[in-house]
């Protein structure tokens, strides 16, 4: 029984369901954690539906706790409600517990870091340390933000539901960011195995649900296209021995052609809408990568130029440099990233190392690889970088 796999796959769904039933995120999370602790003791073998077992057990634990701590009629009424076979009437336009949870976590009253950290914890089941590494911030900072966010949701009476349809756009940017980060954590985990398939699949599912909810939003369509085109390459991302395989070396016959076709159609749909945004442009870049047997780097560079105009961030500049190297050579790319500041981000020294190696500056490249290896938190990525360094030395 892969208990860790079940925990990661079911934790977010169970917390979201219990939150709808209880109306209290902290109580729901504690009840689910208790249920998983009980499962460790009682499961001789995995039940047919482990998620349902956890929800039922957590719900019973919550009833016991409410009764134990109840001193007023309202608490007893809540316990009676939990016993009722009829679940509370769902509010708002969304009927997906986890998507509803994301909208709750992305309330404007919460800080951007609190929104994403809380969602990654509740939806992705990530530990605080994993979230801290993803954001390059101290673990206590993340822990404090999560605690404060849950307290603020409770104290401010932020309801566990999405806003009315005319209010959805106010939270859309945060929701898209969270879905993007959940997928990225699945595609390149901050620790452990390189891939967390459960997070990739769940992020795609939730983005599809969001696209059904807001079919006229081009950035929603763009994010869905981006995730589908990236997910299509996942089967070729890891080699037979578990090693990282970069895009240029992947076996394209392993790519999921149905997802690619769907992603390309969504990109064309975005183009027809004529309101380009960052996710749409990133989707278009991935469409070029998955079109045919090779990449048209000139077209990719033109799209990165457009993305830079929309979001001039250091990460975009770094990714653009990869295209610059293919079109104008490594020297031009290296010049473009020398002034970038991305503390703790191992992809910056890794990219520098690659460019320096291509220029024949071996000693400098080895030093850059050493820096990247020290910063990388995923074992698979670290092994990949060590292999590249070993070839040079």
Image: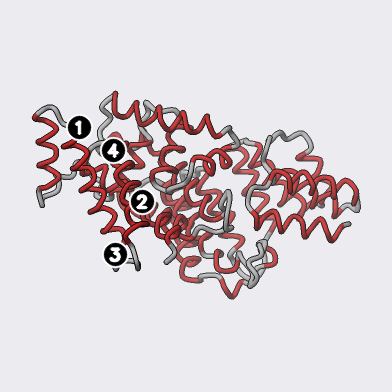
Find the distance from the CA under tag 4 to the CA under tag 2. 15 Å
Which label's residue is closer to the chain start, 1 or 2?
A: 2
Determine the residue located farthest toward the front in the rendered image.
41
Q: Which is more N-terminal, label 4 or label 1?
A: 4
Q: Residue at x 72, y 58 (%)?
A: 384
8 shown above or below 158: below
As helix, strand or loop, the secondary structure at mark 4 comes to helix
- The residue wearing badge 4 is 27
Q: Element at badge 1?
A: helix
Q: Is residue 72 above or below residue 249?
A: above
Tell me the distance, in whole angstroms, between the alpha carbons under discs 3 and 1: 31 Å
Q: Which residue is mark 3?
A: 49
Residue at 66 percent across and 37 percent down: it is: 314
Where residue 87 appears, as percent x and y from the top left, is: 14, 48
* Disc 2 element: helix
Q: Could you tell me if the residues under marks 4 and 3 are in contact, i.e. CB atoms within 8 Å?
A: no
If you read the primary sequence from the N terminus, does the residue marked by circle 2 or circle 3 appear first?
2
Res 202 → quadrant: bottom left
Separation of disc 4 and disc 3 at Cα?
23 Å
Q: Is residue 72 left or right of residue 273?
A: left
Point out the frontmost of discs 3 and 1.
Answer: 1
Residue 99, position as x, y percentages in the image: 33, 47
The residue wearing badge 1 is 69
Sequence order check, earlier mark of 4 and 3? 4
């Amino acid at each position: 029984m892969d208990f860790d796999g079940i925990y990661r796959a079911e934790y977010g769904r169970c917390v979201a369901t219990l939150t709808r039933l209880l109306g209290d995120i902290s109580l729901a999370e504690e009840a689910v954690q208790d249920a998983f602790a009980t499962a460790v003791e009682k499961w001789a073998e995995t039940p047919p539906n482990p998620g349902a077992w956890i929800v039922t057990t957590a719900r019973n634990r919550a009833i016991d706790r409410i009764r134990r701590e109840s001193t007023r009629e309202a608490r007893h009424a809540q316990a009676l409600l939990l016993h009722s076979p009829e679940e509370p009437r769902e509010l708002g336009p969304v009927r997906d517990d986890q998507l509803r949870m994301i909208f709750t976590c992305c309330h404007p009253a919460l800080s951007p870091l609190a929104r994403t950290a809380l969602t990654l914890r509740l939806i992705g089941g990530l530990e605080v340390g994993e979230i801290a590494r993803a954001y390059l911030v101290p673990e206590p900072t993340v822990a404090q933000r999560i605690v404060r966010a849950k307290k603020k949701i409770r104290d401010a009476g932020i309801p566990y539901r999405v806003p009315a349809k005319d209010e959805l756009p106010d939270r859309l940017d945060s929701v898209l960011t969270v879905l993007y980060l959940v997928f990225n954590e699945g595609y390149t985990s901050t620790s452990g195995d390189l891939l967390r398939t459960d997070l990739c699949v769940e992020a795609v599912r939730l983005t599809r649900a969001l696209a059904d909810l807001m079919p006229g939003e081009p950035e929603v369509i763009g994010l869905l296209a981006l995730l589908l085109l990236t997910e299509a390459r996942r089967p070729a991302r890891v080699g037979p021995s578990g090693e990282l395989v970069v895009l240029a070396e992947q076996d394209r016959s392993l790519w999921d052609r149905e997802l690619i076709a769907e992603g390309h159609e969504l990109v064309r749909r975005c183009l027809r809408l004529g309101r380009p945004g960052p996710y749409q442009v990133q989707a278009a870049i991935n469409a070029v990568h998955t079109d045919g047997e090779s990449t048209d780097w000139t077209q990719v560079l033109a799209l990165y130029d457009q993305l830079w105009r929309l979001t001039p961030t250091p990460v975009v500049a770094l990714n653009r440099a990869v295209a610059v190297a293919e079109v104008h050579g490594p020297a031009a790319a290296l010049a473009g990233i020398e002034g970038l500041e991305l503390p703790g981000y191992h992809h910056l020294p890794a990219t520098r190392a690659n460019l320096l190696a291509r220029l024949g500056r071996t000693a400098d490249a080895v030093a850059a690889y050493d820096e990247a290896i020290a910063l990388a938190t995923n074992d698979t990525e670290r092994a990949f970088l060590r292999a590249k360094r070993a070839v040079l030395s």
